[in-house]
Image (cartoon, rainbow, N blue to C red):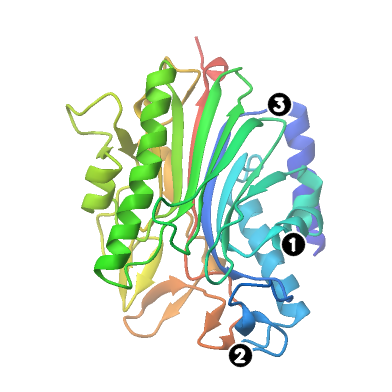
């Protein structure tokens, strides 16, 4: 406890002394961050004190403290500026997270969807109002009217005075076959329409799309429907988004299922932020999976590692999540050496 207090104090003092060094964003699927109270109209009964998960208040508080620990551990130089959180139930969860954990000292504000998801899960966006001043936000509901999570869009002003547009999403899983695929494609098409409108209305827009896509970046849903290309590829369109995080091995990723890693959590950006002439810019090597030791545990099935998850069935394992976070750093133009 004292070590974390000292760490937060160090971050605040260091940050105040030298100013903002860079701009950081992350995405993290928290794995079932429910409160302990039933939300009318939603199937959250297993996460009640008398439900299958025996979701007592101490488990809830333990869960949000762990989420806070992850956010604080991602960047050792300064707090992350914008955080996409998937699988959070409601305002209560995010309010406790930002006001009743170590994050309370950092002044985060937040946005959250009010989705019609059957379990009541939403997508939230934590942001520092000192470095990302939100002036517009909206929830994008799927055109099919299906009971799933909305996409959260936020537009804000950076310290450079430029606008950054952020899309935070958690796509439905592939369970459900053809019907699920139709829904997933429709949601991505809706997001792509919003992105296209930004390219029509703004010159060199700064765009970030991040979250849990429940698909690898090389799937047609990402490469074709969302129009994402690897940033090292030649050609492509000006309006393409760029993939920075490459999943090329069997021993790394953000999610492990039946012994196989995949990178279903990702961050995609517009081409403009890859230019060092832009007000903020980034590089592929600045996008990485956060695989800190405390987020992992031994995988007895193949003698490697796997995410240290919160639950195994109904058993609370005192872990963090079944996903690993992804972090991306940007640098400001005014921090560049002449």
Which residue carries the number 3 mark? Answer: 19
The residue depicted at 25 percent of the width and 59 percent of the height is 249
Q: Position of residue 93 (x, y in %)?
A: 71, 63
Identify the residue at image location x=36%, y=58%: 264
Q: Are marks 2 and 1 in contact (CB under 8 Å)?
A: no
Q: Is residue 26 above or below residue 172?
A: above
CA distance for labels 2 and 1 = 21 Å
Q: Which mark sits nearer the N-terminus, 1 or 3?
A: 3
Q: Label 2, on which residue?
A: 52
Regarding residue 244, the answer to whether it shows in the image is yes
Could you tell me residue 30's position as x and y percent?
56, 64
The earlier-in-sequence mark between 3 and 2 is: 3
- Which structural element holds mark 2? loop
The residue that disc 1 covers is 92
Would residue 266 be found to the left or right of residue 313 on screen? Answer: left
Please give the name of the residue rendered at 62% of the width and 43% of the height, measured from the top-left corner: 80
Tag nearer the camera, 1 or 3: 1
The residue lying toward the viewer, choosing from 272 and 200, is 200
| Quarter that holds the N terminus | bottom right
Residue 21 quadrant: top right
Disc 1 from disc 3: Cα separation:
32 Å
Disc 1 residue crowd, few under 14, some 14–19, many 20+, Cα 10 Å: few
């Amino acid at each position: 406890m004292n070590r974390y207090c000292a760490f937060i104090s160090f971050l605040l003092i260091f940050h105040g002394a030298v100013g903002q060094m860079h701009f950081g964003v992350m995405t993290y699927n928290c794995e079932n961050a429910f409160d302990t109270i039933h939300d009318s109209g939603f199937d959250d009964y297993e996460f009640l004190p008398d439900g299958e998960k025996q979701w007592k208040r101490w488990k809830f508080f333990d869960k949000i403290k762990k989420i806070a620990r992850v956010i604080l551990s991602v960047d050792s130089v300064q707090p992350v500026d914008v955080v996409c959180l998937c699988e959070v139930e409601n305002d209560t969860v995010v309010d406790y997270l930002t006001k009743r954990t170590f994050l309370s000292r950092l002044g985060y504000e937040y946005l959250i969807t009010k989705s019609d998801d059957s379990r009541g899960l939403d997508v939230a966006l934590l942001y520092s109002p000192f470095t990302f001043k939100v002036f517009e936000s909206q929830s994008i509901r799927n055109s099919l009217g299906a009971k799933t999570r909305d996409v959260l869009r936020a537009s804000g002003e950076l310290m450079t005075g430029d606008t950054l547009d952020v899309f935070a999403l958690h796509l439905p899983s592939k369970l459900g076959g053809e019907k699920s695929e139709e829904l997933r494609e429709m949601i991505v098409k809706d997001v792509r329409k919003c992105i296209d409108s930004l390219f029509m209305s703004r010159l060199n827009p700064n765009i970030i799309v991040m979250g849990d896509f429940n698909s690898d970046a090389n799937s047609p849903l990402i490469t074709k429907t969302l129009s994402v290309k690897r940033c090292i590829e030649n050609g492509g369109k000006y309006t393409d988004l760029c993939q920075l995080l490459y999943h090329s091995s069997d021993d790394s990723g953000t999610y492990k299922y039946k012994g196989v890693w995949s990178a279903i959590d990702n961050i995609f950006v517009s081409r403009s932020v890859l230019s060092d002439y832009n007000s903020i810019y980034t590089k592929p090597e600045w996008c990485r999976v956060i695989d800190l030791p405390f987020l992992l545990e031994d995988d007895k099935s193949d003698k490697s590692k796997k995410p240290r998850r919160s639950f195994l069935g109904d058993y609370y394992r005192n872990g963090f999540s079944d996903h690993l976070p992804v972090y991306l750093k940007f640098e400001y133009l005014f921090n560049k050496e002449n």
